[in-house]
Image: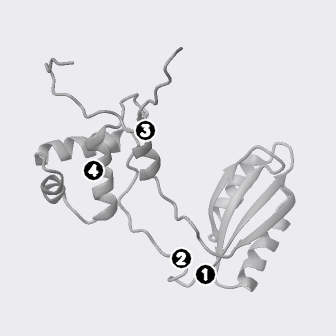
Amino acid sequence: MTAITQEAPMTTDGARLDTLDLALLRALTEHPKAGALELSRRLGVARGTVQARLQRLEDTGVVTGYGPDVDLAAAGFGVQAFVTLEIAQGALEDLTAELAAMPGVLEAHATTGSGDVLCRVAARSHGDLQRTLLQLGRSGSVVRSTSVVALSELVPLRTLPLLASEEAPPARAPGHRGG
């Protein structure tokens, strides 16, 4: 019988995220204003190690920014919806530009299934949402749209549980021999 092993998540350069990488990502998530010195103290490693790991995580695209997390409802955009768009053949590029120009479109993904694009939109009110939906419907790229209003957020966007579920063993020092 062949053993099935879980592999640790890989960065885009093929390196695996190890225990220290995940601890660093967790510390950054919990303390986003912490500098390298504070992170090194929290993790019990040298500041140079933290700086090198952060640089590698940035260089490989794992860490993409350090901006603030914004609560849209607290900022006055308490209505969110998911909109599935069926689009005309060959219209993805044009639609992408149109969606990028609409401030209420938070994100858009090309998808498989009955729709072609899934968008998450935010609005100040149901009337504001309707205006956004009508604007989407006027696009020459959109053949049909279906929307569902989000009532509440049950699980917020998170990445650490997924990364930690496939954690690699700790990195070994160069020249380390052992079993």
The answer to whether marks 2 and 1 mark residues whose Cβ atoms lie closer than 8 Å is: yes
Q: Mark 1 points at which residue?
A: 78
Above or below: residue 70 compared with residue 37: below
- Of 65 and 28, nearer the camera is 28
Q: Please, what secondary structure does the residue beneath circle 2 have?
A: loop
85 above or below 105?
above
Determine whether label 1 and label 3 are within 8 Å by CB.
Answer: no
Q: How far apart are marks 3 and 4 (CA)?
A: 16 Å
Numbered label attached to residue 72: 2
Residue at image position (39%, 68%) is 68
Lateral position of residue 170 relative to residue 88, left or right: left
| Residue annotated with mark 4 | 24
Mark 4 lies on a secondary structure that is: helix
Instruction: Say which residue appears at 43% left-offset and 38% top-offset.
Output: 166
Q: Which amino acid does label 4 sit on?
A: Leu
**Residue type beneath disc 2:** Leu
Q: 134 or 52, which lies in front? A: 52
Circle 3 sits on which residue? 166
Relative placement, left or right, of 40 versus 131 is left
Q: Which of 143 and 17 is in front in this view?
A: 17
